[in-house]
Amino acid sequence: MKKTLLSMLALIVIIGLMLSMSAPALAGEVYHLKGNGVNAYWYEYDISTGVYTEINVSGQESVYNGSPGRPQAKTYVGIQVHQYRYEGYEYIPLSNVSYWGYVPTECLIIDKNLAAVSLIVEGLEGWKWDYITEKSTVVSLDVDVSWTATGPLSRNSYRWHYRSSMSMVNYRYQGKNRQATAQGSVCYDGVSKILGASSWASIFSAREGQVVVNRK
C-alpha cells in the first residue's frame, strides 16, 4: 500500500513536469504557471474474484503565461483505473483504463479557500489496455467526484538556481496544500463504480516561474 501511494505521488510530480515542459524555455524566455488542483486515490480488493482495483483521479485549473503571449487558462483532468491480481507472489496485470486531457472550465469547481471541490464531466474518450488479449480499445468515461478538506492549510516553497558558462536558470515554486477526503462515482467501459471515502486525497494551489538566459 505504501509503495502504491509513493508511486502515485511520483506520478503527480511527473504531471507537473510535463506541464512545465509543454512550453520549453528559449534564450531569455520567462514563464509563469499557477493554478489550483486536486488528487484522489482509491484502493479496492474483491475477495470473491481476487482482483485489486486502483483508481486515481486528478484535476487542475491552470494559467500559463509565457513570453511573448497572453496568459492562457486551461483545465485538465487525469483518470486511471488499474486492475490486477496475484498468483502466489506473482503480480498479474489485467487491465488499465486511462484518460488525460483538457475539459471545459465549468467541469472543475475549486473553492478559493481550498475547502471543497467538485469534478463532474461526462463522455470523455479514454483508452483501455487489456493485458490478457494485448489489445487497446476506446472507452467512454464519466466522473462525478467531490472533495472536502479535512486538514489545515500547509505551505511550502523552494528556489533553484543554475549557472554555467553557457546559460543561467532561475526557478521558484510556492505551494499550498490541504489533506482531504473524496467520494463520488466513476463509469468506464460500461462499468459503474460508487466510490466511498478515498484512501488518500488532497486539494492544492501552486505557483511556479522560470527564467532562462543563454549566454553567447
Image: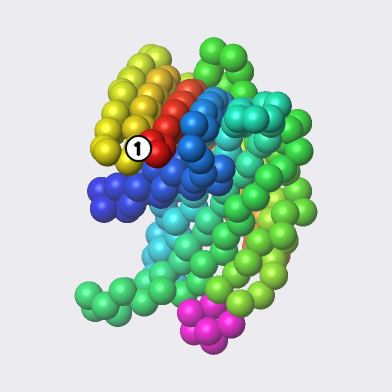
- Quarter assignment of residue 44: bottom left
Residue 108 seen from this side: no
Residue 53, horizontal then vertical, whole percent: 45, 60
Position of 91 with respect to 104 (left or right) is: left
Where disc 1 sits, the SS reads strand
Question: Would residue 20 be seen by someone viewing this image from the given angle?
Answer: yes
Residue range corresponding to the magenta coloring: 130-135
Asked if the stretch drawn in magenta spans residue 10, the answer is: no
Q: Residue at 63% across / 66% down in the picture?
A: 127
In the foreground, 24 or 84: 24
Q: Residue flagged by tag 1: what amino acid is it?
A: Ser
What residue lies at 25% left-to-right and 48% top-to-bottom? Answer: 2
* Residue 93 figure quarter: bottom left
Q: In the rendered view of the protein, which quadrant contains the C terminus?
A: top left
Identity of the residue furthest to the front in this view: 216
Q: Position of residue 40 (x, y in %)?
A: 48, 40
* Main SS, magenta residues: loop
Circle 1 residues within 10 Å: few <14, some 14–19, many ≥20: some
Q: Which residue is the site of mark 1?
A: 167
Vertical relation: 162 (above or below) 13: above
Query: What's the residue at 66%, 61% (across, down)?
Result: 126
Left or right: where 43 falls relative to 164:
right
The x and y percentages for residue 135 are: 58, 82
